[in-house]
Amino acid sequence: MKTPISLIIDDSAPLVQVYYKHIEPPFTQDGRPILENIPNDFLFRFCDTVEKYGIRGKFSVVPNPGCYGNICESVGGFSREVLREWIDTVNSRLSGYFSFCPEILTHHLTLDLKTGKYLSETEREWSVHATEEEMTDYIAYALEIDRDAGIRCTGVTSPWDFGVHNEKNYVLGVAGAFDRVFGQKKSWYFLHEIVGEKNIRPWVEYDEGGRTVVSIPYTVGDGFWQSIDRDDDSDEYVRFIADGYISEDGKSGTIVKALDDGCFPILCTHWQSMFSNGNRVGVRALGEVAKRIENTLSDRVEWVDFDRQAELAIADGIKRPAFQIR
Ligand SMILES: [Zn+2]
């Protein structure tokens, strides 16, 4: 059997760039303003690359991105037609390739579900002390918004390292929320980064009372991110970024290293890394990486989405690594 390989897209949301809210002041390292929005034609460009190479993995849809509004209603002041176009495109062009998930609710401030007002705490801060019940309600609400907007989620992504200091309640919340909203007993979440270890693959984190939750870590870091902070859209730069992942001959790079270490190569990247603050170098470099994988590793790896990753972990009864993970 070939080794499963997957791509993680974090922070993706209709029209607004959540990253804009994460960097203060909102400027690139070389002093350009961070763009607040990502237009739909960029999504089309991303879909072209995914379809061309058959890339698979998971794709976040943040339900209330950056507190700019609920994606069922309106986001960032854009018209319903433009918002609808984004969601319909994700469904029609990406659903065969990616498993979908919320990245909790806002990837920014925590929404108080009782008052409808934002707390001063970020979701990351809130996650440290949330009870199992609060986690379940919050995750369920995120799943419902995506569902009502037309996006069927099968797992959850942590904004930042949401839940890392309270993982038991987080995982119970994931299990409970999927059962409540969809009657779904199996789910997955993405939280952990495990780079440089041997034989890492997704594992069964929770399996009780008929509910199973799989933890899917990333094993290859975000080499596309650098394109946000450098104003360079040359072919040389695209190839330079791709080289970090996989050389043209397929013999070196972070993907090849993970594979040689016995890991499932699970590549983490971000919507802002693909967009490169408007230069779109990241998505070009992704195409170059996928082309090199196709040319040199097609006998060793096979693209799979996160539902498949979870199925494999359950079928093989994989356990959490014994060492301390982040
Ligand atoms: Zn994120």
Image (spheres, rainbow, N blue to C red):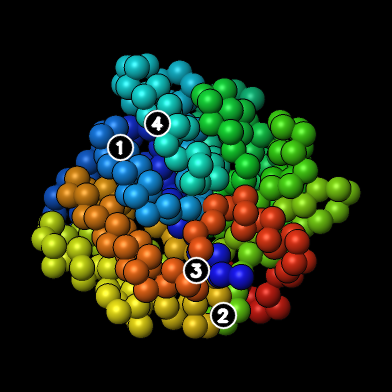
**Residue, far right:** 209
Crowdedness near tag 3: few (<14), some (14–19) or many (≥20) residues, C-alpha within 10 Å? some
The residue under label 4 is 89
Residue pictured at 48% horizontal, 77% vertical: 258
Camera-nearest label, 1 or 3: 3
Look at label 1 and name its amino acid: Phe
Of pointers 1 and 3, the one earlier in the residue sequence: 1
Camera-nearest label, 3 or 2: 3
Residue pictured at 59% horizontal, 38% vertical: 153
User: Where residue 217 sits: x, y (%)?
Assistant: 56, 63
User: Where residue 180 sits: x, y (%)?
Assistant: 76, 33
Whether label 1 touches label 4, CB < 8 Å: yes
Camera-nearest label, 3 or 4: 3
Residue pictured at 62% horizontal, 54% vertical: 308
Q: How far is the residue under mark 3 from the one under mark 4?
A: 27 Å
- Give 162 or 101, whichever is nearer the viewer: 101
Quadrant into which the N terminus falls: bottom right
Crowdedness near tag 1: few (<14), some (14–19) or many (≥20) residues, C-alpha within 10 Å? some
**Disc 2 secondary structure class:** loop
Look at label 4 and name its amino acid: Thr
Locate residue 141 relative to residue 211 in the image: left or right.
left
Quadrant into which the C terminus falls: bottom right
Look at label 2 and name its amino acid: Gly
The residue under label 3 is 301
The residue under label 2 is 262
Look at label 3 and name its amino acid: Val
Locate residue 288 relative to residue 269 in the image: left or right.
left
Question: Is there any visible trace of residue 180 in the rendered image?
Answer: yes
Of pointers 1 and 4, the one earlier in the residue sequence: 1
